[in-house]
Amino acid sequence: MDEPFLRQLAKTAEQSGMIDQVLYDEYNVKRGLRNQDGTGVLVGLTHIGDVIGYKFVDGKKIPTEGDLLYRGISVRKLVQGFQKDNRQGFDETTFLLLFGKLPTKELLTKFSSSISELRDLPENFTEDMILKLKGKDIMNMLARCVLALYTLDENADDITTLNIIKQSINLIAKFPTIIAYSYQSMRYNFQGMNLSIRHPEKSLSTAENFLYMIKGDKRYTQLEAEVLDLCLVLHAEHGGGNNSSFTMHVVSSSHTDTYSAVAAAIGSLKGPLHGGANSQVVGMMDDLKNNITDYSDPAIEAYLTKVINKEAHDRSGKIYGFGHAVYTISDIRAILLKERVRELAIEHGAIEEFNLYEKVERLVPEVFSKVKGTAKRLFPNVDFYSGFVYRLLGIPDEIFTPLFAMARITGWSAHRIEEIVSAKRIIRPAYKNVAPLNGYKLMSER
């Protein structure tokens, strides 16, 4: 299409799509499905996850320390439990989210074995869907592969609970393999690197197996595997209201197939406002290190002031990795992750960089308050440290968001089952049309 003509059409489309912002207030539209007090609009019920950041006392919203519940169990207790046993917890977390209870040792062993048996991709799938169809974006490749798996499923449209469970476990098992192979294909096709396709190892945990497929045998430590496992546990679920899980509910409510619903959730997570925050944190920290000559408090404060004033980094005015839509005082995921980040930084000789992150964490609230003149409390969320962790693990930036998907497929699957079993009604919110009435003009009159 002619470029000038296309630009003209784009400008026309933009003008026709612009709605006067005053109308949102006039009609009391809940933009972003958020109430004016910052709480979310209640659109559903769930047993699966609960994000706790405040409580109401006599009708007043009171900030509280953050907590995250998986099936009513605090994620802190869950993490402390498997860490006390010196084992990894992602499979246990997956079982809990899908089936609503903690597995016995025997059940967990059988469940983990079932997942490991399903890690391999179908015959010729890697060559046809990943290597031949070159892709620069791994999230896009992941969605494409999920939709391709639909064509290989003889019961793809069956939405009985038994079949959805079967499909969900299969996808949970195959996500790490698809992501690892997509990364290897991307670096081979677009970065001129060697192509390394490693078959999944049944004897390894999900985190270990992923590090093996990305980095190779014996190129990761036990601590690295444990920290990656923790990241997967902390990203596995975050309530029904986060954008991708809500997408899963909306699409599943139409009773479409599992693969279409999962692909839609991937598309939501791919958006930088949802799944790309840890990459933005890493970018901001790289920019900080490139623009200050020392890591003193005054130098960091000056840089952060410039960021807030839209004079540094991406000029957005945002300090990435701080604050949250629900948490008001703290993010339990960031607290749990930070406990292991120091150990990892020491192992990698990166304690100076960890100390820099700690300084930024300490200084951001006071700098933000000083510049903005507000008492709003800023705190680090899970994204502030997760990108740093992935860098220490040798995981490239292109895999940051796919790793998020690798964990969240468990929560998505649980929410899909819940929507199909319980809701039984298509989700259809209201949109008010505010366009003026127009008459039709004949071609000769336009």
Image (cartoon, rainbow, N blue to C red):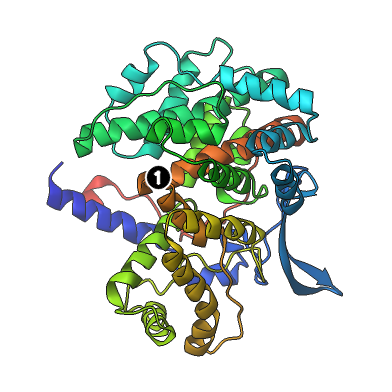
Q: Position of residue 65 (x, y in %)?
A: 73, 68
What residue is rendered at 69% in x and 23% in y?
A: 111
Q: Is residue 245 left or right of residue 346?
A: right
> Which one is nearer the viewer's eye here, 371 or 5?
371
Above-or-below relation of 129 to 416:
above
Closer to the camera, 142 or 26?
142
Image position of 296 (left or right of 113): left
Q: Quadrant of residue 25?
A: bottom right
Residue at the right extreme of this rendering: 58
Instruction: Look at 87% across and 75% down and name the residue there.
Output: 58
| Residue 409 vertical placement versus 256 (above, below) | below
Q: For the point 48% across and 39% down, which residue is it? A: 266
Residue 319 visible? no
Residue 398 seen anywhere in this rendered image of the structure: yes
Query: Which image quarter is the N terminus in?
Result: top left
Q: Residues within 10 Å of mark 1 (few under 14, many from 20)?
A: some
Instruction: Find residue 231 and report its horizontal and vertical position in percent.
Output: 56, 47
Q: Which residue is mark 1?
A: 395
**Residue 119 place in picture, x, y as percent:** 52, 21
Observer-nearest residue: 259 or 70?
A: 70
Residue at 58% over, 43% down: 226
**Helix, strand or loop at mark 1:** loop
Q: How many marks on residues?
A: 1
Rendered image quadrant of residue 232? top right
Q: Position of residue 299 (x, y in %)?
A: 37, 84
User: Amino acid type of disc 1?
Assistant: Ile
